Image: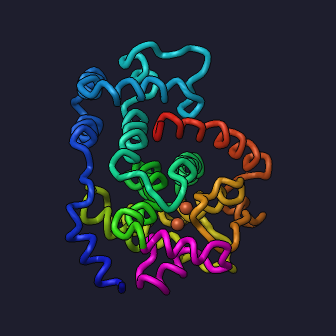
Amino acid sequence: MNKEDIIKLLVKKGDPPPFPDIINRVEREVNNPDSDIWVISQLIASEPILAGNLIKMANSVFFGGGREKAQDLNSAILRLGAKMALDMIYSLAMPGLFPAPKAFSQKKYWKHSLAVACIARNIATPNPGGASLDVLDEVYMAGLSHDIGIIIFDYLLPRDYGRFLRANRGSELPLAKLEEQSFGVSHHQLGAAFIKKSWPMSDELIAAIRNQDQQDNNQPITPKDLTSVIAFAHKIADHCGMGSGVEMGEVGTVAKEELTAWQMTEDDLKELEEEIQESVQAVEIMVG
Ligand SMILES: [Fe+2]
Ligand SMILES: [Fe+2]
């Protein structure tokens, strides 16, 4: 199996799950300056399971749910704001798009993705590093889908990928390198190709997914663009023991000069870690 075969498979196999229509509709409303939050609320209410889970998630620590619990959809969305409600819908809809993976833990995988999404949003907000605001709008989604290629591998080649993971368990090489050796394509390249084909995401987001591992290992990751945000967010997740459980090779550790470059202190990192540890419990709502 080589790169061409896999890309062909990606084009051929059923069609990989399209972005659910509800997301497209909510997205349009969120981006429409004339729309109001009640229209968005009504749209979400038309999908009762999604609406119920959204209220649950809004009340979890993840999205700052605190003392006052939202009882209904309107108050949940009002508190979150339209943009955050959309991010939450992405989180709730994504795991259901794919069959549950056989070769690895779905929960651990989504926990990692959720952590990277949270961290990416957190580190990008005060320090865009020159990235445009439009791109930062997508930072959460980029974090959530940064390793989607792992799911796509499992979706396209469940047997081969499972065998590959078992054979390489404990390897010192990073997963992306091993995949390139075995399949001619890494989960980052495959994920980018999948998103480009199936989901309406920006070129910057696709580039961030594809290029996140192109950072020089001996060089600190500094804030430059969406790609650097995702690469650093993944490293922080690793550093905090929230890896995907699928990745191999050396576990990332955050260097002092990286913290400085991102205008963070050791305390900020610790605080972020605690917040994320609690927040990612929301994965229970995502994957049940
Ligand atoms: Fe990855
Ligand atoms: Fe990752």
Residue 120 at x, y percent in the picture = 55, 52
Considering the whole magenta stretch, tell me its main secondary structure.
helix
Residue 114 in view, yes or no? yes
Residue 44 at x, y percent in the picture = 29, 28
| Quarter location, residue 262 | bottom right
Residue at x-position 50% and y-position 51%: 106
Left/right placement of residue 266 relative to residue 139 reads right
User: Magenta includes 12?
Assistant: no
Say which of 222 and 62 sits in front.
62
Residue at x-position 55% and y-position 46%: 118
Residue 187 at x, y percent in the picture = 45, 71
User: Magenta includes 176?
Assistant: yes
Q: Is residue 79 above or below residue 83?
A: above
Say which of 12 and 31 sits in front.
12
Left/right placement of residue 65 relative to residue 287 reads right
Residue 161 at x, y percent in the picture = 45, 71
Say which of 173 and 166 sits in front.
166
* Residue interval drawn in magenta: 160-188
